[in-house]
Image (cartoon, rainbow, N blue to C red):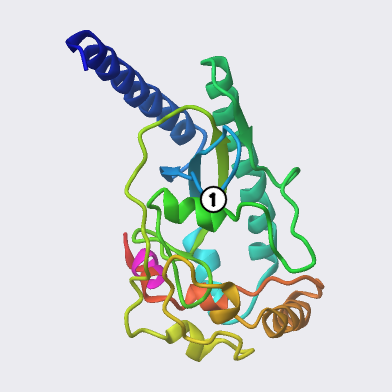
Amino acid sequence: MSRNILLQMGVRRLDMEQLKRALFDLLSEKGAKLMGVGDLKGIVSGELTTGVSVAVPLPKHIVRDLQTAPTREYYDAYYALNAQLDEIVECGADFLQKNGFRAYANTTKVVKKDENWCTPLPHKTAATRAGLGWIGKNCLLVTERYGSAVRLSSLLTSAPLPADQPIDESRCGGCSVCAQKCPAGALLGTLWHVGTRREEILQKEKCKETQIRRMKEATGIETDLCGLCFAVCPYTQRYLQKG
């Protein structure tokens, strides 16, 4: 390979690093607290095989209250953060498009669950590929900084942004607090690794039924929100204890 071609490759790599930094600056300005880039080749098809994952944390006082029961404030925050995340990834996709790349924001408006609670690309999958965290025994993403007290979103792009180091296996170790505290007994205490099926971690129907019951009893709202399993996670507890 000629020296000129190597130099051109170096320039392109530098350009992509600069583009990634500029994108992350924008996402941060819009409120993202965790960001990462994942290589999704083999997971998604087509040209948009670079995934950008973003996360925003739930306020600490809301998470603390969830250790007792679901709350109306959690319900409101859940949807408010989803709306904020939609704006974040839409801005990110628009930025990449203006820089000459294809990009698609996985917003709540376009991503729908099927009857099995599945989406074409779960935000959790994009997040593990982007190094934001791993799938815990609560079947949710666990991050080092915020535990599972986060809401997630993602976007796909054709831009060959430098990928972050993916996380391929659980860091929960022998901890099973979430499984022990689950009021439905729906968590099986399984340590996740890439390729683990959701059914090996979670009994989803038990989970959904209990979430609906607990939320209705506590707030009068009939929806499947609970939050206990992530509120008691030791990683979440560390987030709550930070000043």
- The N terminus appears in which quarter of the rendering? top left
Q: Is residue 95 above or below residue 222?
A: above
Residue at image coords 28%, 12%: 8
In this orientation, which residue lies closer to the viewer: 42 or 88? 42
Residue at image coords 29%, 18%: 9
Q: Secondary structure at mark 1?
A: loop
Q: Is residue 92 above or below residue 223?
A: above
Q: Quadrant of residue 143?
A: bottom left
Count of numbered circles on the image: 1
Residue at image coords 54%, 30%: 92
Which residue does the numbered mark 1 point to in the structure image?
43
* Image side of residue 85 versus residue 17, left or right: right
- Secondary structure predominantly adopted by residues drawn in magenta: helix
Residue 87: percent from left, percent from top = 63, 36
Which amino acid type is shown beneath numbered disc 1? Answer: Ile
Residue 124: percent from left, percent from top = 53, 58
| Magenta residue check for 9 | no
Part of the protein shown in magenta: 236-240
| Magenta residue check for 237 | yes
Q: Quadrant of residue 220?
A: bottom right
Residue 24: percent from left, percent from top = 42, 32
Q: Is residue 178 above or below residue 13?
A: below
- The C terminus appears in which quarter of the rendering? bottom left
Q: Is residue 126 visible?
A: yes
